[in-house]
Structure formats: C-alpha cells, structure tokens
Image (tube, rainbow, N blue to C red):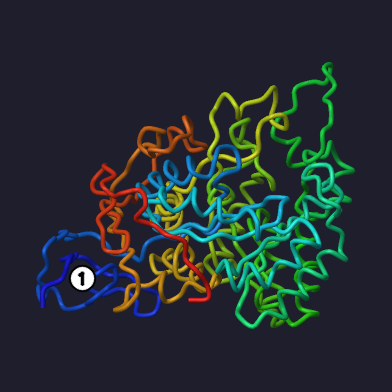
Amino acid sequence: MSHDLVITGGTVVTPEHGTFEADVAATDGVVSAVARPGSLNADREIDATGNYVLPGAIDPHTHHGIYRTLAEDAESESRSDLVGGVTTIGNYFRRPGSYAEIMDDYFAQAEPNYYHDYFFSLGLLSFEHVEEIPHIVEDLGITSFKWYMNYKYAAEEKFGVDCQMLDDFGDTFVRSLAKQDVPTTLGYHSENVEITNSLGDNPYLEVERDEDQEYRDYDALVKQFPDYAEAQSMIAGAALARQHGYGENFYAVHVSSGRTADELATLKAAGWGLTGETCTHYLTLTSEEADERHNVNPPVRSATDRETLWRRVADGTISCIGTDHCCNMADEKIGDDVPDSLPGFPSTATMLPLVLSEGVDRGRISLERAVEVTSTNTAKAFDLYPKKGTVRVGSDADLVVVDLKETKTVTPELLKSAADYSPYDGREVTGWPTHTVVKGQVAYERGEVVGDPGHGTHIDRPI
C-alpha cells in the first residue's frame, strides 16, 4: 500500500505507548500506518533521522480577534503557529451580543484563513448567554466555555450587558453546563476582584490615571493581583462546580502562582477531579525581568513561583500548558508604564520550543511529559481526543518533527506573526520543529511556511 506521506527514521513519542522507533504514514488527512522503520511507501517522504515525531501541539488558550479582526488573526497567527509545531488552537472568544446571531459571521471570517484546525471556547457574559448554552452546544458544536471572574462588577460598563457576573450568574452558568447531555468544559479565570480592586485601579473599568503619578514598574501588577487572590478564587470556583457534580469538567486557566498550584495539588489529592493549566510565560519569565512588554493578568511572578510550577507540571498536578496569546503591535502595547501597557502578548509559536528548552533540555520534565502537557492532555480536556493529541491510526495526521538539539534566537522575523515584537525577543531556545504536518499536509518545512490558509477548519464537538 502506498500512502500520501511518510515520516521515516524518527523516534515517535506518545504518552500512551512511550518512545519507540517507527515510521508514520498519512493518507487522506489521517494517520494511516505506524510501522517498523523502512516498511512504508508514500508519494512524499520526510526524513526524520535523529529527530523526534510528536503529535502536533495544541494551544488551548488564545485570544484571536481581540485586538484585530478574527480574519486577520486567523491568517497571520495560525501561520506563525506552524513555526512552533502547533496544529490546533482553542480561541477564547467573548462578545456581548447573542451568540446565536453573531457566530455565523465569525465562522465566515475564520474558515478561509486558518492554516490549521481550531475550536472556540465562548466567554459567557450574561444570563441571556447562559440561556443559549443548549443552542451553542447542539447547533454550533462548541462545548467549552469561560467564566471570567475578573469581569465581576465590571461587565455592565465594559460590555454593556445587564449583568454584573456575580455568583448567582456563575451558579446558573455551572448548573446549566451540568445539565447538558454531552461533555462540556468550563474554563475559569481565578481572581477575587474584591481583593484586587481594593489594591489598585480596576483595569477593566475606565479609570483616569493621575498625570502626576510616578512611574509604576512590574511590581505594581504583582501587588495588585496577589497570588492568594488567585488561589482563593480557584478553590471557590472549583467548590461550586463540585457542588453541582461538575468538578471533573472544571478547568483552571493560566495558573500563575506556586501557591495556586499547591492548592490545586491539595484538592486533587483529596479526590477533586479538576484540571489545571499554566502558561509558558509563568514557566520561563520572572517579575524581576519583566517590563511593559509582559503586562498580562495574572502577572508573571517570582523565580520561586516559576520553579514550583515546573514541579507541579512534572508531578501531574498541572495537566496542560497554553499561552494566553494575543496579537498586538509594540506601539499599541507599550504604555507610559507597566500597568498602563496593553494586556497580553503573542506567544503560541514559542509554546512547544520553550517547553522543550526549559523543560526537557534542562531536565525538569521528560519528553513524554512534554507531549502530554502540550498535546495529549489538552485534547482530552477539550474533548478532542483521540482525533487530536496522539499518533495512532485513524487520528488526524497532525504531526511535528522536532530537533531537540537545534538552538535558535527568538525574533519576530523567526516567528512570522503579524506582531512586531515577542516577549521572548533575543532568548536562546533549544528544541525546534523542522517540519509541521497538518492533517497530512506539510505546512512548515525548515524555516518556511508551505501550507495553505483555509486548510484548517472548526472542530465541531462532541466528536
């Protein structure tokens, strides 16, 4: 039998089966064979000798369409993703209008432009949104959602909705998800805003800054958004989900602090079936080195937090890694000081390389664990598995060949995003893709994007 594509000579890595020598073939967009080396024939061959073949990385936490149009971000940012071996993204998307009325337009913007597959996770902002959950699940194929605790008390002014997103809203939200007949996922932004609002200007409300105020450095963010406010909120949100039998579907997004990760470990040890996610900036940066480019909520924290997060990634407490990716330009991003700067930064393309470099190369985690937290576990958490997140016959042929020894210096030119800066500018990173394959199509090859926009599509769930 001849296949469309075969990757030969590589070492395959999957959490289910470990690490082994094999050739991997793709036909009609799916994996058609995993076989002993030298036993497969194909129209196109990739020589992966000396390198590793992984399931394509999945970034579950992006915000496409937040600072630019969704069509623009879909094209430029999915192109950039291929450089870093990412073959699927989850887009956290929030709009005040009826999703039943507006999503057709956003699908129309997305479908012609994505180089790889994607799925939406919708932020619900009102009781009207909660009422739409059955339609969103059944008709739009979207089964993941987000509860933004940081918009509590601010939603009415920021979005123009008739809801302050208090706990009665969250209770109704969780109960509605628990009633659905198919698996769903609730992403939860952990933040006790009664605490954070008391420690500084609410960044989600229109607050005029005193012109005479002195320059505020990164510590201002860390002080306004303390670790305990994140940890307490995470526990409270998980407890509410658990009260409604929804605990195993609770997904704590962007865990930033060692304190929160430790509390997550305590809950899991007590039998709470929840999922924790951290982001690459919390694993690779510290507040001491952060500046205006790194404004994000929650903020980057200390070196001690960073090392605790790595330990919790290694021991299984933290199951998934994402990026909280936003595409913005440097002149829009950089403000008068750190809190005045625009929140969010581009980073999906560096996700897998940073995990390989700072995690595997430095001995913090195994290569198998890196695959789990950047692909397999994420596919399971968002009900994409085994379509995504593994190398097995019948799964989508989303594959990445990585050279664990290759070192590159991060630059915007390398990453091919529309953004003209990176929070990792100038950083030496070891472990990069040589090839990225999306549904059997070679989309990135040795520094060049060779795929096609529109090759990706929305993943309707459940699958």
Horizontal arrangement in the rendering, residue 262 relative to residue 200 (left or right):
left
Residue that appears at 72% across and 79% down: 178
The quadrant where residue 427 appears? top left
Horizontal arrangement in the rendering, residue 130 relative to residue 459 (left or right):
right
- Residue 308 percent location from the top left of the image: 61, 58
Q: Is residue 308 above or below residue 22?
A: above
Residue that appears at 73% across and 36% down: 219
Classify mark 1: residues with Cα within 10 Å, few (<14), some (14-19) or many (20+).
many
Q: Is residue 360 above or below residue 385?
A: above
Is residue 430 among the parts visible in the rendering?
yes
Q: Is residue 398 above or below residue 445?
A: below
Q: Secondary structure at mark 1?
A: strand
- Residue 456 percent location from the top left of the image: 39, 57
Q: Quadrant of the N terminus?
A: bottom left
Horizontal arrangement in the rendering, residue 460 relative to residue 333 (left or right):
left
Judge by depth and name the residue closer to the eye, 263 or 165: 165
The quadrant where residue 120 appears? bottom right
- Residue 138 percent location from the top left of the image: 60, 74
- Residue 248 percent location from the top left of the image: 66, 78
Judge by depth and name the residue closer to the eye, 203 or 260: 203
Residue farthest to the top? 212
Residue farthest to the front? 101
Residue that appears at 41% across and 33% down: 412
Three-letter code, disc 1: Ala
Residue that appears at 76% across and 60% down: 231
Q: Which residue is mark 1?
A: 25
